[in-house]
Image (cartoon, helix red, strand yellow):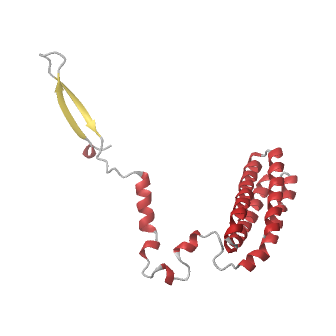
């Protein structure tokens, strides 16, 4: 710390009336009271091109909301229905990697196939009538919570838990495919 950034505060105090002592206290540099959270928020605000668009979001080809959608922007329900079986099969085929106890490869394949399947199922759920959506959302949640649990179990190399979760995933996936 340089001398320019510190200040000395001297005050006198005496334990006894006839004593003359001085206490010197160094103060640290002045704080601006900007926390890391505020600084990172400001950084993202100023670096992000999104708030500074001249055109409204509806006029652009891909709007701000498209970045946060769960569906592929141009994916139709028919495309999702055609792809769901293929992506479901690739999710089920992770079994071969799990049997070989090739944990890292199983995790990579699980994540890849699950993300594609997630987009397909979500697109199909959005197209269903309101009464069917609730049941499909529950199954969707159960399926992908199981996939996350399987990912963690594979990371921990917990063989009994891996097979328990894998069987739950297969049963839930069959139930979803029968309703779609």
The C terminus sits in image quarter: bottom right
* Residue farthest front in this picture: 131
- Please determine whether, in this image, residue 51 is positioned above or below residue 60: above
Q: Is residue 59 visible?
A: yes
Q: Residue 44 is drawn in which quadrant?
A: bottom left
Q: Residue 112 is drawn in which quadrant?
A: bottom right
Q: Residue at x 47, y 73 (%)?
A: 50
Answer left or right for 36 relative to 112. Answer: left
- Please determine whether, in this image, residue 89 is positioned above or below residue 32: below
Answer left or right for 23 relative to 85. Answer: left
Q: Is residue 102 visible?
A: no
Q: Position of residue 161 (x, y in %)?
A: 80, 46
Q: Residue at x 25, y 46 (%)?
A: 4
- Please determine whether, in this image, residue 114 is positioned above or below residue 163: below
Q: Position of residue 149 (x, y in %)?
A: 73, 51
Q: Position of residue 34 (x, y in %)?
A: 36, 52
Q: Residue 8 is drawn in which quadrant?
A: top left
* Residue farthest left in this picture: 18
Q: Residue at x 65, y 72 (%)?
A: 71
Q: How many marks?
A: 0
The N terminus sits in image quarter: top left
Q: Position of residue 6 (x, y in %)?
A: 26, 42
């Amino acid at each position: 710390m340089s001398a320019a950034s510190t200040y000395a505060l001297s005050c006198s105090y005496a334990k006894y009336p006839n004593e003359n002592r001085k206490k010197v206290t160094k103060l640290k540099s002045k704080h601006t009271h900007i926390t890391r959270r505020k600084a990172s928020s400001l950084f993202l605000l100023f670096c992000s091109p999104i708030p500074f668009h001249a055109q409204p979001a509806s006029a652009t080809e891909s709007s701000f909301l498209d970045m946060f959608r769960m569906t592929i922007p141009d994916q139709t329900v028919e495309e999702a229905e055609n792809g769901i079986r293929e992506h479901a099969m690739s999710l089920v085929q992770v079994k071969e990697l799990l049997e070989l106890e090739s944990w890292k490869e199983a995790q990579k394949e699980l994540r890849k196939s699950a993300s594609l399947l997630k987009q397909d199922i979500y697109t199909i759920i959005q197209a269903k009538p309101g009464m069917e959506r609730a049941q499909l959302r529950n199954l969707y949640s159960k399926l992908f919570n199981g996939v996350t649990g399987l990912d963690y179990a594979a990371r921990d190399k917990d063989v009994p838990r891996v097979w328990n979760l894998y069987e739950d995933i297969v049963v839930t996936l069959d139930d979803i495919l029968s309703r779609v």
